[in-house]
Amino acid sequence: MRANEIKKYYNHYDYLNYLSIIDTEQVVCDTRDIEFVEINGCLHLVIGNEEIPVRETALNTILSRMGVSGSTWKRMFDVELAECFKTLHQYLPKHVSVMISDGCVNSMNSYKYVHLPMTEIMESTLQTIQNYCRDEIKCEVTTGFDATIVRFNTDKKIKFNGSSRNLIITLMNSESGESAVHYSAFLQNKQGGKIPFMSDITVEHRGDSTIESVEESLNAMDAAITKAIKAVRRLEKRYIAYPINTIKRVGKRIGLPEKYTNMVLSWAQNLSTCTAADIFEQFSLSLADVENCVTLDRYKNDVLKLVALDWDTYDKK
């Protein structure tokens, strides 16, 4: 997500109603039937008799999806915008898939790109998540230029490391950039800190992907959550005799930047002993200041390496 993102709060009924109004339309075009023109200083895509504005933020995505290199991009922008985009036809495949959202071109892709509508993704997701919940689901929706993130606050309580935690499930649908549906699951403590306990479940918007592909992944989510919870709970039974030494060693082993290891070391300064679950939780909470989604995802996977560690190797003087 980018800095200029918008955060809104919905119950799931309101969000589905909102999606039904603004959801993205996919149009597959013959390259010979489209044209780029400049109207009042803004780039437009002409499809048939319709002139559709191109979002300024979509230009880089459009170029990268078409395989245009950075040096070509720079050279093209030494001339007028519409003129440089006219040359794009030499890079286009025979057919292109144009994504239109809110009356503007959001991205362009090879026709092999499959658009999975957010409305259908949400409906399938909600149907699965309601298996965990008794009350109405609250959605925290963050939208940016490259993705929409929906955080589902459930009332499901899961016991971990001595206290009950709320189960939070997050959906990220990227219609430009990575082009995939990602599902993440977290445990949240009373202070709002998030503890990732499983790897993302991902469905690419490519090839033969359909909404059924998303539903298959959702059907596997229950088993994945159950298996992951059992794995992290095993950390509760592993007592650490030398917390400071262990934190230093495992921090180096999982490859996180040193500042996050230092944050966990600060927490452990006066401890004579702790559990592997304590260390796992503190490394997870140390990532709270990471704002970039791609970076956070990488660091989260680093922290998840702690679940499978042989702690005897690191718990030494």
Image: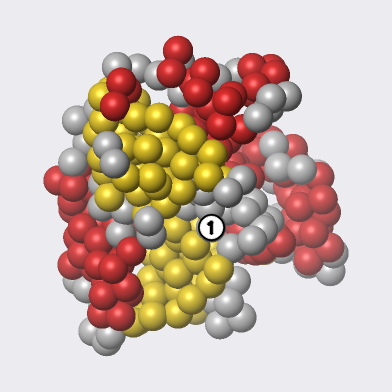
Q: Is residue 160 visible?
A: no
Specify the amino acid type for callout 1.
Answer: Gly
Secondary element at tag 1 = loop
Query: Residue placed at 25% from the left, 67% from the top?
Result: 20
Residue placed most toward the observer, 55 or 177: 55
Q: Residues within 10 Å of mark 1 (few under 14, many from 20)?
A: some
Residue placed most toward the observer, 278 or 241: 278
Residue 124 at x, y percent in the picture: 19, 60
Residue 144 at x, y percent in the picture: 53, 58
Residue ranking furthest to the bottom: 135
Residue 7 at x, y percent in the picture: 53, 72
Residue 50 vertical position relative to residue 36 in the rendered view, above or below: below
Residue 31 at x, y percent in the picture: 32, 23
In the rendered image, which quarter is residue 138 located in?
Answer: bottom left
Query: Residue placed at 34% from the left, 29% from the top?
Result: 34
The residue indicated by pointer 1 is: 144
Quadrant location of the C terminus?
Answer: top right
Query: Residue placed at 40% from the left, 47% from the top?
Result: 52
Q: Is residue 87 visible?
A: yes
Label total for image: 1
Residue ranking furthest to the left: 212
**Relative to 273, 85 lies left or right:** left
Residue placed most toward the observer, 247 or 258: 258
Residue placed most toward the observer, 48 or 20: 48
**Relative to 208, 157 lies left or right:** right
Query: Residue placed at 41% from the left, 65% from the top?
Result: 150
In the rendered image, which quarter is residue 170 located in?
Answer: bottom left
In the rendered image, which quarter is residue 283 located in?
Answer: bottom right
